[in-house]
Amino acid sequence: MSQKLNILKFLLQSVILGLAVGFLIVYFKPSVIENHEDNNIITNPTDAPTSYANAVNKIAPSVVSIYAQTVNNPRVSEEVQQLLGVSSLLPQTMTQQYLGSGVVMSEDGYIVTSYHVIQQANQIIVSLWDNTILEASIIGFDNVTDLAVLKIEAINLVPATFMDSDKTQTGDVVMTVGNPFGLSQSVSLGIISGKGRSGMNVSTIEDFIQTDASINQGNSGGALINAQGNVVGISSATFNRNGAQGINFAIPSNVTKLVMHEILKYGKVFRGWLGIALIPPRYLNDRRSKIAIPEKGVVVGYVSPGFPAAKAYIRPGDNITHVNDIAIQNIFQYKELIAKTKPGETVEISGFTGASSGGKPFTIQVKTVDRPPQVK
C-alpha cells in the first residue's frame, strides 16, 4: 500500500513540477508560444498578392485608346481600270484604320504613343478611359525610337507615374495595359524576361525591355507597368517569328521621358549622324560577297558624299571597331552610340581600312551632324 502511495506521490510531484515550469516559461518567455503559433499561421511575406487591382486602378485613367485613320487614293492606273472594265466599281479613295494605345503624360493633354501607330494617319481619334472621344494632333515624333507625342484639348487628366527603368530587374512582375483588338483597358500579366534587347528591326535605337506579358495588335503605345501601377515602359512590338510565343518588347520609361522632353522643348530629338550605312552580316555571309567577315566591329557599306564620314576619308569596305574607345559588337550598337550624340559633338572612330587599302589601322576625330529625318 505504501508503495502505491509513493508512486502516486511521485506522479503528482512530476505533474505539479511540469505545470510550474510551463507557467514560468509562458510568463517570462511568451515569445516561445507566439513564435510557434506564427510558424503555423503566418505565410511567407514574399508570396505574390492575390490581386493587382490597385495597380490597374492607378494606371487606368492614364491609358487611352488610339484610332488612326489613313485615306489614300487607289494605286491603279486608269489604263488598267479601263482594261479590266472596273473603273466605275473602284472607290475613289481607300481608307485604312489602325488601332493603338497611348499614355497620358500631362494634365493638359500630352500623350505619348508608338510612332508606327500614327505614322500614316490623316486623322487621329483618342478615347479616354471614361469613353470621352477627342481628336488629337501630332506634336512631334522620333522614328529612331519609334515614339510620338500627341496633343488633345483636355484638362484635369491623370498623368501616369513613371518609374526609373534602370532599376527594373529580370523577374519583376509587370502588366501591359492597352487597347488590343479594340478591347480597351485590357490587362495582361507577366514578368520582365530580359533587358537591353536589340536586333528586332523595329527602330534604330533598340534597348528594349523584354516581357512575356501579352502585346497584341492595338497594345502598341500602351503602358507596361509594375506591381505598383508605375510605368516602366511603352509597349512596342511582339516577336512572332518561328512560332515564338510570349516574347514581347517595350521601350524603357527613361528613354520615353527623354524623347518626350526633347520633342516638347525643340519639336524634335536632335541626334548625331556621320553619313555611314553599314553592311548587314547576312550580306557578308553571302558567298558572292567580296568583303571578308571581320573578326570584330562592323563594315562600312556606303558613305554619303559631303557628310562627315566622307570628309574624314572613311570609305566603303572599312572596318570600324571602336567609337570613343567602346568596342563595337554589331550594327545596332554602332547606330545607338552615334545617334545618342548631339550634332556638332566630336566622336573618335577607330578601325582598319578596307582590304583594297591595305587594312591599315586608323583613328580619326569626326564631328557629327544632325541626323536627317528619313534616315533609319
Image (tube, rainbow, N blue to C red):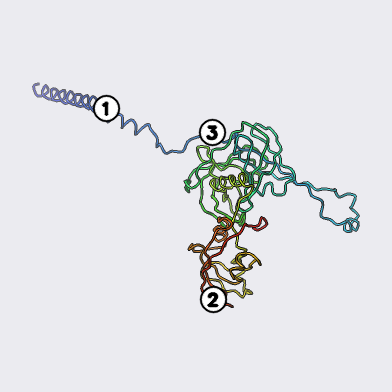
Q: CA distance from mark 2 to mark 1?
A: 81 Å
Pointer 2 residue:
359
Callout 2 amino acid:
Gly
Mark closer to the observer (3, 2): 2
Q: Is residue 274 left or right of residue 4?
A: right
Callout 1 amino acid:
Pro
Is there a contact, CB below 8 Å, between mark 2 and mark 1? no
Callout 3 amino acid:
Ala
Is there a contact, CB below 8 Å, between mark 3 and mark 2? no
- The numbered dot on residue 74 is none
Disc 1, SS: loop
Q: Position of residue 130 (x, y in %)?
A: 65, 31
* Label 2 packing within 10 angstroms: few (<14), some (14-19), many (20+): some
In the picture, the quarter occupied by the N terminus is top left
Q: Is residue 353 above or below residue 272?
A: below
Q: CA distance from mark 3 to mark 1?
A: 38 Å
* Residue 300: quadrant of the picture: bottom right
Disc 3, SS: helix
Q: CA distance from mark 3 to mark 2?
A: 61 Å
Q: Position of residue 367 (x, y in %)?
A: 57, 62
Q: Position of residue 244 (x, y in %)?
A: 59, 54
Mark closer to the observer (2, 1): 2
Pointer 1 residue:
30
Q: Earlier in the sequence, mark 3 or mark 2?
A: 3
Q: How many marks?
A: 3
* Label 3 packing within 10 angstroms: few (<14), some (14-19), many (20+): few
Disc 2, SS: loop
Pointer 3 residue:
53
